[in-house]
Image: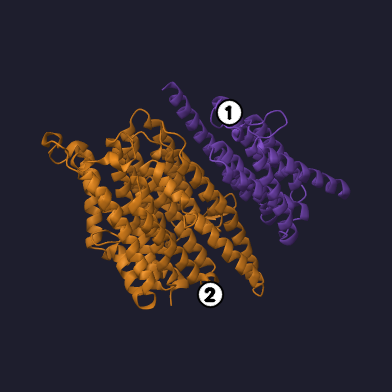
Chain colours: A purple, B orange
Amino acid sequence: MGQIGDLLATLSLGSLVATGAILVVARKWRLKVLALAIQYLLVVLLLTRIIRVELAAVKGLTGWLICAVFYVTERRVGSPGPPVSSSRSRGDRPWRGEVLSAKGWFYLLSAVLVFVLAYGAALRLPLPEVPAEITLACYLLAGLGLLIVSLNENPFEVGLGLLTTLAGFDLFYVGLEPSLAVAGLVGAVGFMIALATAYLRSAQAAEGMEGGAA
Amino acid sequence: MITGSLLLLSAPLLMAGIVYLVLRWMPSVAALLAAGTSLLLGIAVITLPLDQPVSLWGAGEIAMGEEVTLLGRELVLEPGDRVAVALLFLTASALFLLGWRFSPRSLLFPVGLGLLSLLSGALLINPFVYGVLFIGIGAGLAVFMLQEEGAGPSRGAVRYLTFTILALPGLLVTHWLLERYAMTPDDTGLLTAASVLLSVSFALLLGVAPFHNWVRSVGNDGLPLAAAFVLTVGNGAVWFLLLDFLQSYSWLSDQPLFGPVLLAAGTGLVLVGGLLAPVQPRLGRLMAYAAMVDAGATLIALQLNSSLGLAVALFSLLVRPFGLALMGAGVSGLQARTGGDRELEKLSGLAWRAPWSSAALVLGAVSLAGTPVGAGFVARWTLCQALAGSRPGVAVALVLGGTGVVWGVWRVLAILLRRPASPKDRPVSAMGGSEGVSTAAVLGAMIVVTLVVSAFPGLIASVATSLAETYTPFVP
């Protein structure tokens, strides 16, 4: 049972790296929302190592509700970022087949750097009250979230970054304070981030439409 | 029987729903309902006794000081929280009244009421660390009022949300670290980690340089009165939360680095605000930098680590709403004349058409700068006197910071007072000017109240002094 748990934790960690990289690099909103939903599933799997399954499931449900908010908003307003221009420089181009744009490579390398830093931090500064793999997951999610926030100004992406950081912190804090009240309040913070960024995203889309009409 | 804490949490929320429903069809009624509710609750917090229930019109009893348990946490209005909670409600009331004239259809009213509920919850909840989470939820809610209708996404709202959320983990972990330190006082590493986390988290929340970016952005593109709301009511709750931290964990202020860190943070804010205020191309940014200078002075007062320093800091917190509300109203009034254009050059000659808004802007800036005639002068003067002997350089920095703000507003005034080319373009109008009588009356009343506070600061000073005595770490 313990070995299965360890294997599951290792697999979850590996998958978190992948979903984190997708959140940093991908340009398609559907891919990002899907990555966020999977990220919440992986967080739930890791959480089951330190708290009761029921509480972990509640946190997962909150996360998926947040994903639903993003999905509905983006579905209504379209894809984030400026419209694709034919005169755009080569460095600004999005994914073309399997090849990343220069910006995409930069983002990916930054994500790799965050992973290395998170690994180093997990070795040198282990978090109290949580196992080693959770420590790494916390640092990784917090670092990737900060990276997303610092690389973007688009409300949708800033929201994703903040939620990723919050998920990383929650993994750690739930071990220190496993009460339902705190879980509820942290969930409410996450949900409010999603609503606020969705509202700003709608304002952005409305402005784009007005600009287009003019 | 209704308990005070439950009343302060539920009444604004209930009224927020009503105000939101009414806002679309009767914006004036919505604004006045919001202002009236906040005013009544603010007065109730100050006047009703905490130790015994009060019967209101025979309909029911209110026990203001009674404890209530919500989700397993205690909520109680304690004597020390009274002034803080009243300050939030009364400030909000004034801002709603100004919003009635300048942003009647905005979400300022329902969202502001919702925020009042959350922020008073943040101050009333025990253990108070859960208040940090209320402030996080409040930051998300504040985004809805900072975003101007029809404008692009407010960068200020995004940054305010970002910085507030990033501050939460540090504060929550600090609480846990300090609880552990209380059990193992030999482990000083816990205290060091807690101090670092606490400093960074409050620096993020208060917009201390180099984390001041959100303050500038909120002033730059947020709805002006909503920005004033965030910088007074929102930040006011954060300031009192900081004082609660220092009160609960008194050894924090005994740390050798406590004074130097606060001094560096405060001086940095004063210098950044004072140096950048004169060169701002937009009114909102000038308001943000003026608020930064004032916040920096408050931090410098706090680092004195004495009852005088705390009294000066509290006085600054109590009078800051006068300056920021007036500036927010002035910016709103002047922007309305330029069709929403925020560039300074578009304000040319507007003082002749919007004299009350111009006067409000100038008096608000002067108050925040801490110069004579302004409401903040007494606090700044006392602080400079206290610093003159021991740290003359910091006193000079304070004066320079204030001068920078005055220079900035002088520049604005020169543009506002430009005379139109022909005399016929310069309207010479009566009382209300072209701003309307009710706008002139509201602004005039606010200006008079600010001038009265400036001329007779004794009442607020006595409140600040008695409040300072409730914070034991600062009492000699």
Residue A100 pos. (x, y %): 68, 35
Q: Is residue A165 visible?
A: yes
The chain letter under disc 2 is B
Disc 2 from disc 1: Cα separation: 52 Å
Q: Quadrant of residue B398?
A: bottom left
Q: At 35% from the left edge and 49% from the top edge, which residue is drawn?
A: B280
Residue B249 pos. (x, y %): 54, 68
SS at badge 1 = loop
Amino acid bearing label 1: Ser
Q: Which mark is residue B256?
A: 2
Q: Quadrant of residue B263?
A: bottom left
Amino acid bearing label 2: Pro
Vertical order, B265 against A118 (above or below) = below
User: Do callouts 2 and 1 point to residues on the same chain?
Assistant: no
Disc nearest the viewer among 2 and 1: 1
**In-front residue for pair B324/B64:** B324
Residue lying at the far top of the rendered structure: A213
Residue A97 pos. (x, y %): 71, 28
The chain letter under disc 1 is A
Instruction: Give neighbour class at mark 1: few <14, some 14-19, many 20+ (Cα, 10 Å).
Output: some
Direction from residue B378 to residue B77 in the image, left or right: right
**In-front residue for pair B321/B296:** B296
Q: At 34% from the left edge and 69% from the top edge, which residue is drawn?
A: B396
Residue ID for mark 1: A79
Direction from residue A179 to residue B423 in the image, left or right: left
Q: Which mark is residue B224?
A: none
Residue B81 pos. (x, y %): 43, 59
Q: At 34% from the left edge and 75% from the top edge, which residue is drawn?
A: B388
SS at badge 2 = loop
